[in-house]
Image (cartoon, helix red, strand yellow):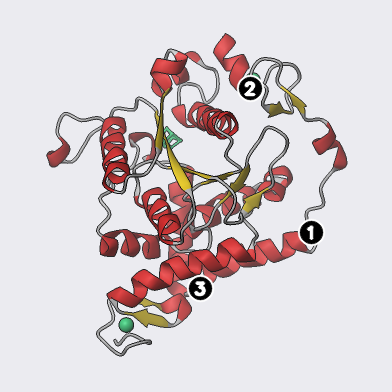
Amino acid sequence: MKCRICGQKAVVNMRQHKLALCKDHYLEWIPEQTERFIEKYKMFTREEKVLVAVSGGKDSLSLWDILQRLGVQADGLYICLGIDGPMSPTGEGLSYSSESQRLTEKFADERSLKLHIVDVQKEYGATIPQFALKSHRGRGKPCSVCGLVKRHVMNRIARDFGYDVLATGHNLDDEAAVLFGNTLTWAGEYLLRQGPVLPGTPGLARKVKPLCRIYEREMLAYALLRGIEYIYDECPFSVGSTSIYYKQLLNRLESDRPGAKQSFYLSFLEARKSGLFAEREEIQAELHLCPKCGQPTSAPGLCSFCRMMSR
Ligand code: SF4
Ligand SMILES: [Zn+2]
Ligand SMILES: [Zn+2]
């Protein structure tokens, strides 16, 4: 297989795009694609300040790397969740959170990038697993509490430090799996909010997903070829999750029909654009600012985060 651009030996073959590229051209192609999607979906302008949520994984660190290469002014935010878990032999004795934090800090230091670090236990008094045990949300399973806390912290840091945009490293596989789950239950409100850009509201930064059209395996190849050191282990709580199960199902579909995942996601975006999921006006009107933290919420009185904290 030869690189379509220079004819040298190709290292990546993307059946879904009918495109094979050598290392150098692949490392140029991914940032070019990302830039194309940033512009196509009007994610942000060069004047805006971007905050990238980084977890230490391949997608978020690669996103940060790509934004730097594109000349975007982007700082990082790492949230220490306090999650311990089994590690590879080389990381013996380390927890999932401290190893991912170490790699994120190393990445930022080597490139002289600004990184905000929020330690959930230090700032809010408990780790994510401890919060989950105390909360009725998910009956001790931490993912729902974790999502709530991460959203709150990301919104807070973006607001307090004046960032216009919050960027996350969700790739096409992540988005297709979420879409699949929401479609199985026709979760209208979630379908309406899913997309490359979630517009901001007063006090809430716009949320964007610049990698939403790039396959997970393409991001993996990018991180490896670029030599980015990232945490290989997944969060121990992700084992057996429905989103991983949906990803596996979609991978089976993709291997029989290359491009199926992309077409599933893109046709959804088209359908949404043409008004298949019309917004109910009262949903927007119901939002008010939480009297405690000042973030917009649809819950009556305090937002879900502040209610959990007060419990
Ligand atoms: S798998 Fe669950 S607990 Fe782990 S980082 Fe993701 S949401 Fe949080
Ligand atoms: Zn080439
Ligand atoms: Zn609140």
Q: Earlier in the sequence, mark 1 or mark 2?
A: 1
Q: CA distance from mark 3 to mark 1?
A: 23 Å
Image quarter where the N terminus lies is bottom left
Residue found 29% across the figure and 27% down from its top: 84
Residue 25 in sight here: yes
Outermost residue on the right side: it is 281
Q: Return the residue at label 1.
A: 276
The quarter of the image that holds ligand 1 is top left
Asked which secondary structure carries label 3, the reply is: loop
Residue 278 x/y as whole percent: 82, 52
Asked which secondary structure carries label 1, the reply is: loop
Drawn side of residue 212 relative to residue 11, left or right: right
Q: Return the residue at label 2.
A: 304
Numbered circles on residues, count: 3
Outermost residue on the top side: it is 311
Asked which secondary structure carries label 2, the reply is: helix
Above or below for 9 versus 43:
below
Residue 47 x/y as whole percent: 59, 52
Indicate the amino acid at tag 1.
Leu
Residue found 67% across the figure and 62% down from its top: 269
Q: Nearer the viewer, residue 163 or 92?
A: 163
Q: Which mark is residue 259?
A: 3
Question: Dot 1: few (<14), some (14–19), or many (≥20) neighbours within 10 Å?
Answer: few
Residue 12 in sight here: no
Mark 2 C-beta to ligand 3 under 8 Å: yes
Indicate the amino acid at tag 2.
Ser
